[in-house]
Image: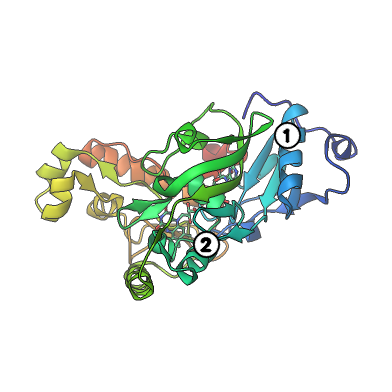
Amino acid sequence: MSEYATVPPIADLPSFLPKGVPLRENVSMAPYTTMQVGGSAEYLIVVRDLGLLAEVASALHAASVPHWVLGSGSNLVVSDRGIPGVVVINACDRIEVGTETMAECGCWFQDLFLAAAQAGLEGLEFAVGIPGTLGGALVSNAGAYRSSIGALLTAVDVVWEGVRKTVEPEALEFRYRDSILRRPGGPRIALLRAWLRLEPGEPHHIYNLARDYQRQRISKQPPHPSVGSFFKNVLDRSLAESLDSLPASLKEAGVIPAGYLLEACGMKGLRRGNAIVSRMHANFLCNLGGAKASDIRWLAEEAKRRVRDQFGVELEEEVLYVGDWSGWEAAN
Ligand SMILES: Cc1cc2nc3c(=O)[nH]c(=O)nc-3n(C[C@H](O)[C@H](O)[C@H](O)COP(=O)(O)OP(=O)(O)OC[C@H]3O[C@@H](n4cnc5c(N)ncnc54)[C@H](O)[C@@H]3O)c2cc1C
């Protein structure tokens, strides 16, 4: 993102943008995120038309204006100093269910599940309870219960380094909670719409499975504002085998839930300002109301330090830090 120039003054921005795009200045980002922390976006645009979204992304890229396409802000922490540049909120949400399902990337992931389920198509049950848009889900290859979105994708329409095109799923390089869009220094990509392969299923089975997943979620998830799991689970077979109290199935799979490590490090209940590591689930960092983004970040760094010291592994954030984080440690 650093290769872009600085942001031109607002008077100049409309000359880069398609006509009639509603541009707002200095908009607080907290209401646009589930963690509800952070400063303001220098400029914000909400786009509801896919063609316009493509034009905006191409135009901002061509003018070297720093910009970020966001969905519903359920997987990010915005810095207290805010986001220099233009935030583009993707609200393009058309869904067409069929032999191949097409969905615009601003649609709610859960609406996509519902539309598919109503048409008797299975595969998206795991999406129930994952907040956010399809775009955000693709960026982090969102998933749960051993399924993830990347596996269902057949093609995706994008603006890639300023050029609109359709690419194969392989181009997005999906991994566990990861894609090319998360790589530092990776290409600039705005996700526009995606095509998914969903198989016909038995409606009772689809709804029962989704209900079961939802029940499991409700019993495990803290109620306070959060971003869901803050850290990725650790994939390390030898560490998994060395942990006596880890369930056998996880040892076998070589997976250690981040929450397991964090709980063992005594993170549950640790508080900084109005930010807290949930007592219910150690991998949930929560805003008790009025928390600062730097408090959340402080807890996250403390969590990483303790896990590194005790287990010798480096936790990796599932969440993304957005905005100007320079000097946050000094301010803390
Ligand atoms: C209570 C709770 C439970 C959760 N449970 C899960 C879970 O079980 N599994 C899981 O995987 N995640 C989970 N999450 C995390 C989150 O919901 C997902 O990662 C979600 O898919 C993010 O979507 P979003 O629209 O909110 O993305 P945002 O948070 O808005 O954006 C995330 C990233 O994607 C980028 N982005 C978004 N849209 C586009 C686009 N169209 N083009 C290019 N870039 C884009 C943004 O720039 C940003 O870098 C949970 C979150 C919460 C709050």
Disc 2 marks a residue whose amino acid type is Leu
At a point 37% along the width and 45% down the height, the residue shown is: 302
Crowding at label 2, few (<14), some or many (≥20) Cα neighbours within 10 Å?
Answer: many
Q: Which residue lies furthest to the front in this view?
A: 99
The first of marks 2 and 1 along the sequence is 1
Work out how far the residue at label 2 is from the one at label 1, CA to CA, in angstroms. Answer: 27 Å
Give SS at disc 1. Answer: helix
Q: Are marks 2 and 1 in contact (CB under 8 Å)?
A: no
What residue does disc 1 label? 58
At a point 38% along the width and 38% down the height, the residue shown is: 175
Circle on res. 45 = none
Q: Is residue 281 above or below residue 41?
A: below
At a point 71% along the width and 49% down the height, the residue shown is: 50
Give SS at disc 2. Answer: helix
Discs 2/1, front = 2
Q: Quadrant of the N terminus?
A: top right
Residue at disc 2, CB closer than 8 Å to ligand 1:
no
Which coloring applies here?
Answer: rainbow
Q: Is residue 235 visible?
A: yes
Locate residue 201 relative to residue 64 in the image: left or right: left
Q: Position of residue 251 (x, y in %)?
A: 14, 48
Q: Classify residue 176 by image quadrant.
A: top left
Crowding at label 1, few (<14), some or many (≥20) Cα neighbours within 10 Å?
Answer: many
Q: Classify residue 234 by image quadrant.
A: top left
Disc 1 marks a residue whose amino acid type is Ser
Q: Is residue 125 above or below residue 160?
A: below
The one of 235 and 135 positioned closer to us in this rendering: 135
Circle on res. 112 = 2
